[in-house]
Amino acid sequence: MLFLELPNEILWCILHFVPPQDSLVFLKTCKSLYQLKNDELFWRELARHNGIIYLHPNQTWWQLYVSGDLKKTCSHIHSSYRFLNDQIIKQDKCDLFWNTLLLISADSSGYDTNHHQEQKKSNCCQEQKINGICLYPNCQFKGCGDATFAPESNPGHLREHYHATGHTLVLKLSSLHFCELFCYACNKPVGFWGFPSMDKPIGERYLVRRIVQSLMNTLPTDQELKKKVIERRRAIERRLVWSQQSHEDSYIIERKWFMRWNEFLFEKSDQIPDHLTNKTLFKHHDVKELRSDIELGTDFELVGGVVRSYIERVYDIDGPVISAYELQWKPEYRKISESILFRRHIMQRGPQGVPTDL
Ligand SMILES: [Zn+2]
Ligand SMILES: [Zn+2]
Ligand SMILES: [Zn+2]
């Protein structure tokens, strides 16, 4: 009997014992099995069987499987994503998002252990402690969580809401975790988390980006409300930039875009920058290879991992972002690496050149 004559469920059971990264080697053991590699329907069904019905547009179902991402991907995001295509639901979510944004203070870290002892009996949170909204369609719940939204010991009203309703996904809006998603069913942040977030499932990051951008880039039509929302957004983004230490600045981004962003943040312009491309920093013939003649402060600026992840999920980054560490040992980029080290040295010593820790 040929392997391929077995029902899919049995093949999936066999595959269950093979680590996804080794599955290509496994498939190569038999000619008929190897045909499976190109059978997208088979891998799509396997993904569905695991609750995953979405993937990155540049990915195939086989690639999703062999990358090992299938097991790491949250299966709860797609419903929120789908519902945001519905104009009425999207408008409701946007209203909830804007109103919550205006309630939370820009300097709230989202971490407060006392709040829950005081508020245990109450069903609603003190307005200034609200730092997340439920993403379930038609649900208007907003409430508090803790810094990570994870520890059971300090659950927060958003987690209580999940236990009561089964609504798994929340959008965090505290200033340190602004516009990050957390899934209570998976009990982990989804899309962008940790540093670098690059090795996280690309399909998951893609959907999170779509959700965040669809909320962030839809501004209120009411001019007064719009002004307030933009002001609050600026305050949160400025705080995010300030919370980064200079030694964390290691990602190279186009200075032109960076200046446009600065103009927006510091109220010189109301124009919210478009997505970041970094196009001018790369060699024409190779969009992945950085030019060696670019200069810090003229062609590019540096941002830390948190800011880079923020730009990626809120503004979108089209194309690669190079880390300064990648350039360190390449002679071609010696000048760039030196200027980055020099900048860090100056920053650590403070504006007068006196070490700040003396
Ligand atoms: Zn999940
Ligand atoms: Zn609360
Ligand atoms: Zn809900």
Image (cartoon, helix red, strand yellow):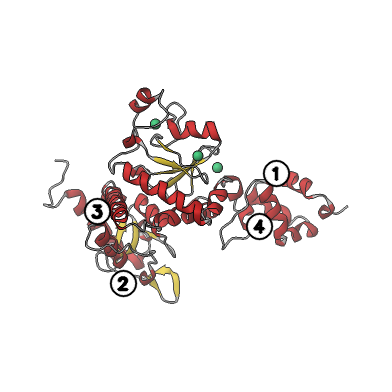
Q: Is residue 12 positioned above or below 312 on the image?
A: above
Q: Earlier in the sequence, mark 3 or mark 1?
A: 1
Q: Which residue bears the numbered disc 4?
A: 62
Above or below residue 274? Residue 351 is above
- Secondary structure of the residue carrying numbered label 4: helix
Numbered disc 1: secondary structure: helix
* Disc 3 versus disc 1: nearer the observer: 1
Q: Which mark is residue 16?
A: 1
Residue 298, located in which quarter of the rendered image? Answer: bottom left
Per the model, the C-alpha gap separating discs 1 and 4 is 15 Å
Amino acid type of the residue that numbered disc 3 sits on in the rendered structure:
Arg
The dot on residue 293 is: 2
Crowding at mark 4 (Cα within 10 Å: few <14, some 14-19, many 20+) = many
Query: 271 or 43, which is in the foreground?
Result: 271
Question: In this rendering, which labeled residue sits more in front, label 3 or label 4?
Answer: 4
Q: Amino acid at mark 2?
A: Asp
The span from disc 3 to disc 4 (Cα, nearest Å) is 43 Å
Q: Residue at x 34, y 61 (%)?
A: 252
Say what secondary structure mark 2 lies in: loop
Instruction: Find the distance from the CA under tag 3 to the CA under tag 1.
Output: 48 Å
Q: Nearer the viewer, mark 2 or mark 1?
A: 1
Residue at (24, 64) in percent of width and height: 297
Mark nearer the N terminus (1 vs 4): 1
Q: Could you give the CA–CA distance between mark 2 and mark 1, rounded to whole angstroms?
A: 49 Å
Q: Which residue is mark 3?
A: 344
Position of 345 relative to 128 (above/below): below
* Residue 182 place in picture, x, y as percent: 47, 42
